[in-house]
Amino acid sequence: MMTGFAGSLLFTGCQPPNDGDPAANYPSRSIALICPWGEGGGTDRLSRFMASEMEKRLGQPVVVQNRTGGGGSIGHSYGANARPDGYTVTMGTFELSTMHWMGISDLTWTNFTALAQLNADPAALIVHKDSPIKSVAQLIEMIGERSEENRLKFSGTAAGGAWDLARAGWLLSAGLDVNSVIWVPTDGSSEAVRKLLGQHVDVVCCSLPEADANLKSGDLVALAVMADERLEDYPDVPTLREMDYTWTAVGWRGLLLPPGTPEPVVSNLTATIRDITESDDFRSFMSKNKFARKVRFGSGFEEFLQTQDALWKEPIEKAGF
């Protein structure tokens, strides 16, 4: 009798609580945070910060996996197709809004559950301190006056990258052809800024933080930022909207889940991310890395993604991508 009773206790003790509802025990093991871009870059740094902060709060390891390639499509695809159990989170980026229009992938925001937007870095128009261009109006006038052979040179990133597309959209909004300037492709904004410092290009289109040191030194001057409102860290830089141009363009990052992730898991992660984004550590990290904070959750992030998806169709088509 004792043996049977002991065996019964052992059997009962082996049953995990809430076995029929894994979401109730979430998280019970390590979580993968997928970064679609390489180690050391801005997206990777933000991914690793968020992984560390999530780990502290969730009590389970959160491991960043850099799944790169395909213009961001490899990592995004892996995240979208992962098991929807909350153990794979993707650090989505701006490219999700453009890759399907460019024929790189069929992925769109609809292939994910929107968890939380973390930042949005607007594009800006930047010139050399000795440039004859002193305003956006003057820049537009100069572009319109230049001949085909004497077009102004813009730079900021690779052809078809975020800042190239921001430039194309701005030109269209100003009633100009996307090919009315020459785009000089680079490996990134750092190289473009060096070209501008050497006056090898006329204008750089990139985020203000990417040119921060040279803006503060006075070697470069920001004409305008493509945002809805002035940035907290750059209060003296006007927006295009202040000049009656409606165009805005931001490079964004945010956390995404596979579609069909159980609501209790989504709620758990939402509360965790909210706690992180309201912390002094988050504000300090974002400020140190010159990332503009823009936090949206759930439906708010989803609405933003839907708007971004529609925004880029025309610039990409007109630019020939």
Image (cartoon, grey):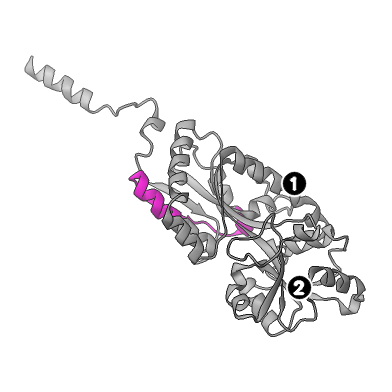
- Highlighted range, magenta: 50-73
Q: Quadrant of residue 15?
A: top left
Q: Position of residue 128 (x, y in %)?
A: 71, 80
Q: Position of residue 108 (x, y in %)?
A: 66, 45
* Farthest-out residue, front: 236
Task: State the residue at coordinates (58%, 64%).
Answer: 233
Q: Is residue 138 positioned above or below 300 on the image?
A: below
Residue 200 is at least partly visible in this image: yes
The quarter in which the N terminus is drawn is top left
Residue 63 on the magenta span: yes
As drawn, the label of residue 310 is 1
Report, in whole angstroms, how far the alpha carbon at label 1 lies from the one at label 2: 25 Å
Q: For the C terminus, give its image quadrant.
A: bottom right
Closer to us: 46 or 286: 286
- The residue shown at (66%, 57%) is 250
Q: Earlier in the sequence, mark 1 or mark 2?
A: 2
Mark 2 = which residue?
Answer: 154
Outermost residue toward the top in this view? 1
In this picture, residue 5 sits left or right of residue 21: left
